[in-house]
Image: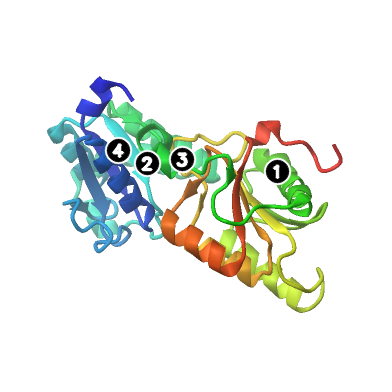
Amino acid sequence: MSVAAEQTLLAIVAGGGKLPADVAASVARTGRRMLIVAVRGEADPEALTGFDPVWVEWGQVGRMFEILAREGARDTLLVGSILRRPDFRAIVGDFGTLRRLPRIISAIVGGDDTVLTGVIRIFEREGLHIVGIGDVAPELLIGLGPQGRRKPDAAAKEATDAAAAAVQALGHLDVGQAAVALGRRVVAIEGAEGTDAMLTRVAELRAIGRIGRGDHVGVMFKGAKTSQDLRVDLPTIGPQTVKFAADAGLAGIAAEAGRVVMVSRDETLALADERGLFIAGVPSLKAVPGPNA
């Protein structure tokens, strides 16, 4: 990051989960000035304690842009989950949102990638520059190789290649960011239900003997979709991912290095070590061979 960038104000628009606080803490360690605009009902007030966020109601897009303009923010990071629908009453009271409503409606039509592209365009039309976690908090991205005490063996490498090839093959369909493989056999692909639900499904299949019994067999791979904009909605793993992977009897979690975020890193790695799972960063999907290579 350049000296000029470090001196400019970074706006963090915070949704739900622990990731916004992790990012804020990482940025704070660099000394860069930041302003956190937290979405009420999504962002976690307790996690953001100490960062003095400005709160906006879900739907007050106009007010949010007014705050960013007043504070002189340009670089903007969108981070955290958004699970609720806007409260119509909040929109009605925000004339800035009403003025932008046609653009907002246009942005939210389509799949995940289409929506995110539309949201980015809305911010860019306001003169804001969207940045990614890798630009402002690269230490949160998973690096190459084992991240904890456990290391993947040859069987895990074979399963990782198969799962990664499945994610890569389906990337253009805007499906999911994760898959589970046992050996060369892909047994689960993430859909709209999310990673945790996919792992729960694997645990259920294992329990009834559909994919074999026993612990520490198989690998979950998680990576960015091939056409994904890495400034927003990066794949994440965290303590919950480890818990569900362990309950599914997997040997470990492989993640695309430099393109997947580890939330609550210390807690995640400690839990993986405790449950006997490895977490390893593997090369970019562009370099991943197919299962029959």
Q: Secondary structure at mark 1?
A: helix
Colour treatment of the image: rainbow
Q: Check contact, mark 2 vs mark 3: CB within 8 A.
A: no
Q: Secondary structure at mark 4?
A: helix
Q: Position of residue 215 (x, y in %)?
A: 72, 71
Q: Check contact, mark 1 vs mark 3: CB within 8 A.
A: no
Residue 232 in sight from this viewpoint: yes
Mark 2, residue position: 104
Q: Sequence-wise, which precedes: disc 2 or disc 3?
A: 2
Q: Residue at x 53, y 40 (%)?
A: 143
Whether 21 is drawn above or below 98: the answer is below
Q: Secondary structure at mark 3?
A: helix
Viewport quadrant of the C terminus: top right
Cα distance, mark 2 to mark 3? 11 Å
Cα distance, mark 3 to mark 4? 16 Å
Q: Sequence-wise, which precedes: disc 3 or disc 4?
A: 4
- Figure quadrant of residue 190: bottom right
Mark 1, residue position: 170
Q: Position of residue 150 (x, y in %)?
A: 61, 57
Name the disc covering residue 100, or none: 4
Q: Sequence-wise, which precedes: disc 1 or disc 3?
A: 3
Mark 4 belongs to which amino acid? Arg
Q: Check contact, mark 4 vs mark 2: CB within 8 A.
A: yes
Mark 3, residue position: 116
Residue 193 in sight from this viewpoint: no
Q: Between label 1 and label 4, give the one nearer the viewer.
A: 1
